[in-house]
Image: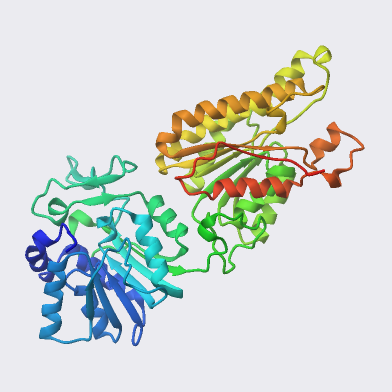
Amino acid sequence: MIDSAYDAVADWYDGVTEAGSLLHDIAMPALLNVVGHVDGVHICDLACGQGIVARRLARLGARVDGIDLSQRLLDIAMRYEAEQPLGIAYQQGDAQRLDAVPDGCYHGVICVMALMDIPDLGAACHTISRILKPDGRFIFVITHPCFQTPSSSWVTDTSGIRARTVTNYTREGFWRSDNLEGVRGKVGAYHRTLSTYVHALSEAGLVIERLEEPLPAGDIAEHTGVPSVLVARCRKVSLEMEQQDAIPAAHATPGGTRVQPLRGHVAMVTGAGRGIGRASALSLAGAGASVVITARTRAELDAVGNEIVAMGGSSLVHEADVTDEAAVAALFDATLAWHGRLDLLVNNAGDNRRANIESVPLADWRYIFEVNATSTFLCSRAAIAPMRAAGGGRIINVTSMAAKRGSATRGSYSAAKFSVHGLSESLAAEVLQDDIHVTCVCPGAVATALRARSVPGEDQSTLLTPEDVADAVLFVATRHPRVVLPEICLWPRA
């Protein structure tokens, strides 16, 4: 028999929930509204407990299977079924595996107030995706992760106004409430940030299509204005890449039927007006990200922003000199004001002025370091706090094969790119504990205006394209957080 924390409290839990609870009273109407028509629909009530939701759905005409880890709760559910038969089939199973359940057998999976009980959220989401039919729906209800955290509480000011305080939102893990008379005091829960839920769903091919944050009816003072639960409906989509190990198309149209692995993510691309920056911004937008594009030339940025909008994507155009500390601070302020988070930073701003070391003016040397290295330092430093708050992220530094070996007339450029590599390795060692990954993408010769200016008369048809590099950027951006990828090198075959 599989152990469950609910086995020890099953009778108590049944009495509490059957009598009615605030969360169930709030959640059930919203859940049924999101579920919609279920007559004749085959549904799995996952982590069904003693069958409250299963029975409600069965009465609406659904064909329901109830699965739970707790045999004691299942015994209670089967007792209710025996007393009033509704055709519900119950079985014991672990939501993280469900080996006995065949692939693609359900039109819908519902999980109410239980994802917080499951240790491996990613495994559960993949299992749910597996047992759903193509285009099936996954609907879940959880305690609202933004407002119901281990450190949240109600406070009352001197005028009697009650407010909700939330701290340590990004501190994920198992916790147990101090209220030993409540469910979370007896069995505990896993607190996760909203972004963690979104990422786990996306990795499993479950795309969120509707969210509800229901408030209680009537005048319930201590909950007024603060949602206690979050209700979500997701759609299973066909994965174009096995476990996201293939590089997604750089210019796929948002809104299509394929998976958008960066949907819900916010990305920033510097030097985004042309070349590699433009191609990377379009690629990330095609993968579903909301993209902040920045450079010093407004007209070029506006053109790229219009391209993203034409694809059905979302962008914030922000002209900035990323070698200037105050300008970088304003850029990040605008980004957080736009979407409140940052998940991905692509440091692409750069320039090159070729000359023998003997003839390089000091002003040029400083300029090359400013635009290539200082900009990377300033933006990376500014990205750490919002990425940490989001539960992790990726910093991708577009460098060059010049960062791997020096060559004549590229001394200042090569030295600056070498320094970006050193910065990247040091930063990676500092922030990996926060699930912030740092990767260098090192292309060889790329057919850009910068390259044409530096090497006039070169046949650029033999070179990498900006889209080649953008594909590498997207590959890094869509890796699972467990994947550490220090660098990617690519160069033209010719």
Q: Is residue 451 left or right of residue 29?
A: right
Q: Position of residue 215 (x, y in %)?
A: 27, 62
Task: Locate residue 54: give its quadrant.
Answer: bottom left
Q: Could you tell me residue 283's position as x and y percent?
A: 64, 52
Residue 99: name its quadrant: bottom left
For image coordinates 58% across by 66% down, the residue present is: 255
* Image quadrant where one finds the N terminus: bottom left
Q: Is residue 18 above or below residue 252?
A: below
Q: Quadrant of the C terminus?
A: top right
Please state which of residues 471 and 171 is positioned toward the viewer in this rendering. Answer: 471
Color theme of the render? rainbow
| Residue 273 shows in this picture | no
Please give the count of numbered marks on the rendered protein.
0
Q: Can residue 308 be seen by looking at this rendering? A: yes
Is residue 7 left or right of 34 when viewed as pictured? left
* Residue in view at x 37 percent, y 52 percent: 194
* In this view, 348 is above or below 352: below
Residue 153 placed where, x, y %?
20, 45
**Percent x, y for residue 339?**
49, 48
Name the residue at 24% across, 47% down: 174
